[in-house]
Amino acid sequence: MKFRHIATVAAFLLLCHCAGVESSQNSSTAEGSAPAQVETLKVKAAQGRISIVEDGKAIAFIIPASSNIEETKFINNQEQLVVKSRGSHGPATVQLFNSRSGRQEGKIMAFEIQNDQPEWAAGMGE
C-alpha cells in the first residue's frame, strides 16, 4: 500500500511538471504596504491540483477543496496564494495557502465573504 502511495505521488509530480497548464498571476499587496516585487512564482493547475513553480521547479503542491479551480491570486508579495474552487455543482470554497510550503492557512465558503472580509479573500465572493 505504501508503494502505491509513492507511485501516485510520483505520477502527480510528473504530471505537474510535464502536463500542467500554466496560468499567469497578478501579485497584489495589502493596502499601505510596499509595492510588489518582480514576480518569480507561477501557478500551474492540472486536474484539480496546483503546483507553485519558481524558476521552472515546483516548490509547493496544493490540492484544493474541490476539483474545478475557478480562480487563483497571489497576495502579500507572493507569500500566499488564494484559490477559489468548486465541485461540479454547489458552493465554491476559497482557501489561503502558504506559497512556499503549500500549507493551508485559511478557508471560507465563497458565499460567506461579506464586504471583502476576510481581507485575503477579497474579490472571491459570490
Image (cartoon, grey):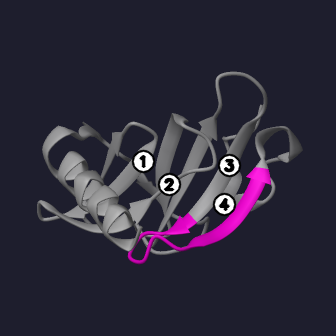
Q: Judge depth for marks 3 and 2 and give the one in front.
A: 2
In the rendered image, residue 83, in percent from the top left (x then y), is placed at: 55, 49
C-alpha span from label 3 to label 4: 10 Å
Q: Nearer the viewer, residue 59 or 29?
A: 59
Which residue is the site of mark 1?
A: 49
Q: Nearer the viewer, mark 4 or mark 2?
A: 2
33 relative position to 34: left or right: right
| Residue annotated with mark 2 | 63
Give the crowd class for mark 4: few <14, some 14-19, many >=20 residues within 10 Å.
many
Please state which amino acid type lies under the numbered disc 3: Val
Q: In the image, what residue occupies the spot 27% across and 61% down?
A: 7
Q: Give the residue pinned by disc 3.
A: 94
Measure the alpha-carbon separation of dots 1 and 2.
5 Å
Residue at horizontal 68%, vertical 49%? Answer: 94
Amino acid on which the number 2 mark rests in the picture: Ile
Q: Earlier in the sequence, mark 3 or mark 1?
A: 1
Q: Amino acid at mark 4?
A: Trp
Is the residue under label 1 in contact with that under label 3 (CB below 8 Å)?
Answer: no
Q: Position of residue 86 (x, y in %)?
A: 65, 34
First-in-chain label (4 vs 2): 2
Q: In which image quadrant can residue 20 be found?
A: top left
Residue closer to the observer: 76 or 20: 20
Q: Amino acid at mark 1?
A: Arg
CA–CA distance in space, label 3 to label 1: 14 Å
Q: Kindly state the secondary structure of the residue where label 3 is placed.
A: strand
Q: Is residue 115 left or right of residue 42?
A: right
Mark 3–mark 2 distance (CA, rounded to whole Å): 12 Å
Q: Which mark is residue 120?
A: 4
Which portion, as a residue range, is magenta?
97-108
Q: Under tag 1, what secondary structure?
A: strand
Q: Earlier in the sequence, mark 3 or mark 2?
A: 2
Contact flag, marks 3 and 4 (Cβ < 8 Å)? no
